Amino acid sequence: MNNTSTGFKASYKCLIALLLCSIFIPAVFAQSVNVPKGKQFTMKVTTGLYGGGLEDASEAYLFKSLGKNSSGEAEFEVKLIGAANSGVVYYVEKRKAKEVPVEYLNTSRLRKSALGGNALYYMALLNKPVIVAINGKNEVTKVSGAVEALKEQFTKWQVEPDLTAWDMGKVANYKQTIQHLFLQLPDKRISYDSGWENPKLNASYKVIGIKGALLEITAVPVKAGELNAHEGSYSYNEVFGLIEKQQTKTIRVLKSDETSFIGETYKQEIEYSAAEPVLDTAWINMAAMMSQSSNVFNTAGEVDGKKLLPYIKQNNARFKDDPYYELAKLRLVGKIKGGNGNDSLLLRIPNHLIANSTSHMFNKLGRVLHVSADSAYALSKYFYNSYSFTDWVNNSYAQELKDDGRNANVAALLDLYHTAKEPLIRKKTEGLYLWVTARQQQDDLKVLKNTSAAFKQMSVADMNLSYGGRYALMVYKMLHDAKQSREANSLLQNTIHKLAQATADTLNVDRYQAQNMLAYAYYLQYEDAKTADSVKALSYLSLAAKYSPANNREKAHESFYDRVFLESKESYRQEFIEKLFNSGNQQQALEIFAAHISSEPQNIDEMQKVYAEHFPDKKFKDFFVNSIMPGWQTAPAFKLKGIDGKERSLSDYKNKWLVLDFWGTWCGPCRAEMPHVNEFNDQVVKGEYPGIDFMSIACYDTEIKVKTFLADNKYGIPVLMSDNKVEQLYKPDGYPAKILISPDGRMLPVKFGADWLGIIKKFSALYAAN
């Protein structure tokens, strides 16, 4: 209570002092900005976006009155003393984008900020004095020092040219930023019920109340429905000419043709007591120079060890255990051409500093394993609940156990996992532990049978969590080779039953991995039965073909490692097709053949040769049109708005082949392939691909980010903004994703990394657009 009272009295005294000083100011300036020389106050602003993004930002400006200049204008020294900016980032796990909130910058806790977004811009301007002049109508007439301050810092930090150009353009609008803090007045004095207009903002103002020195003002659009519009409320101190509170909303047109706009929310408050923060300039300079936007340590576009390593040696003691410094050092050293110094850095960096980076955890775990099993186990406890840990255990670590199972540390870690206090660690490693135990004692039939019994008792969920299907099938092979047919077949049947359940569970994110192993399990049954019962064997091969991946989504990335361990194939469809062709069952063979081509469109030339061998008198083109394309799903209708402001529907591309590209500016692989995509679009526009069109859909993104990315890179691709529903309709299996849509509206997803351009050219030749 005493602290609150004291703070109130201090603020009240400061306000009274300002009021008394203002008595002697001429009446003509009674409502314009009129703050006694030497007095300070802080303007705090919070902005946000609606209808165009998710970011929120706040800024704090310290004003110090310099009195009147020779022109009679109020002059201030203005310093940016605080800034915060937050938003969302997207990361991909199992090729699915996930949204994560992030604090790009907060100057009050700078070292804990991600330093993304506009961080360098704000860091460069912190506490830098800018001189501002404001005339009698509260119009900002002069801003000097901002451009120079930013240029000086960016030159020192060697900020990359693209970001420098962008931020120099932003600082050039500093005048507009400051103007927003002041209410522009009409020529005449305002009082209760006064009204005036600001045509530039399409705003009509009116004084609706008076509370002492404060005028309560509302703003509404002059013309309803206009894209340039401004509305909200103000508390305006008519003695000092300052906005004490503001809560407004503005819609701004981004293009002169009024096809694109963005909405902004704006809140502002004043504090008459203020203090300039003390900056850790050494840390700020380090963070900027070691950022991904700096070229300080680069030579010819690559990190130069001769520049970086001396800097690190000089600053290791100063920034020891600083999370940002340690991670930036790790990243930069790893980019030194021909160097591998980040291996030793990664081993030395404290685990807690990389706790939020699963990629660093993943890489360090592989290295520390060969130093100490205990250290590897301690590190594992930081991220065992992540998919990265599961990936490392079953794909990297399991490979080491397979190839080097006698290494003391490698073997010891598995024992630590098996006896871990954390139940999730035990569950995630149980399948691996059972297989390794059986493999080490595969001549002991009792151990093999006990291992088989353990797998059979494992639940579907635990089997799925520990990649148990993979390891159970490997133990099956051991039993089969040991001539233990009864136990082997029992384990195989049990594993098939569980894999079938996991495959049928649409909520299981690993169902396609289970499906691919199920295909191999049926193939193992085929292999076992083909000499004794060819009819029964063919039925098993039919199931192996049925559960082979039919499209890109079903080609689970994790299945690659399963095939390495199991020595299995991605698909058994072609083998089944050949069997059917040779058996004379052409109709069934052709149906499966058509499905196989849709699953593997990149192999269409090879499949065309197979077709010609078996049906030399028929045209593959007719088979493609009449048997393959009808099996594709109908492309869902959509209607989305483009960044050019125009709406487009799927029906706009009727009777043409369409390459539909799902992407986002947040997606590294999307950005990497964009030059190729942009070149293709340019060729489409020039008419080099008759009957083929192109459209992209930006997902989990904002219009401003997309426009900025395209403008910065001079890309001209057409872009529709996702409505957050179109992804649910098309279900891309990751980003980027190419979906080919036929002239009659059927769609075929193309596997990431496949030659989608070659495929669409071949399809277009087989089925010409109208």
Image: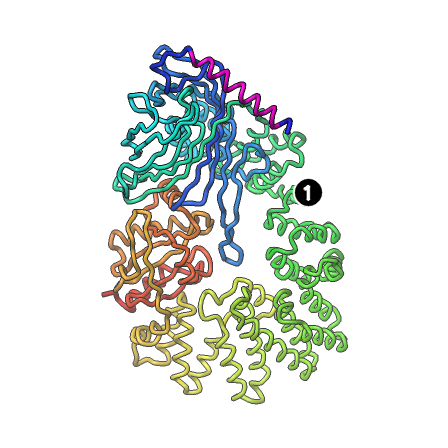
Residue 118 place in picture, x, y as percent = 47, 36
Q: How is the image coloured?
A: rainbow
Amino acid on which the number 1 mark rests in the picture: Pro
Quadrant (top left/top right/bottom left/bottom right) for the C terminus: bottom left
Residue 460 place in picture, x, y as percent = 62, 71
Q: Is residue 553 left or right of residue 397?
A: left
For disc 1, the neighbor class at 10 Å (few under 14, some 14 to 19, many from 20) is: some
Q: Quick one: 243 or 471, which is closer to the camera?
A: 243
Quadrant (top left/top right/bottom left/bottom right) for the N terminus: top right
Q: Quick one: 385 or 87, which is closer to the camera?
A: 87
Residue 404 visible? The answer is no
Magenta segment includes 233: no
Q: Is residue 364 left or right of residue 755?
A: right
**For the view shown, which residue lies furthest in the left direction?**
770
- Residue pictured at 28% horizontal, 43% vertical: 225
Q: Is residue 435 left or right of residue 170?
A: right
Identify the magenta region. 4-23
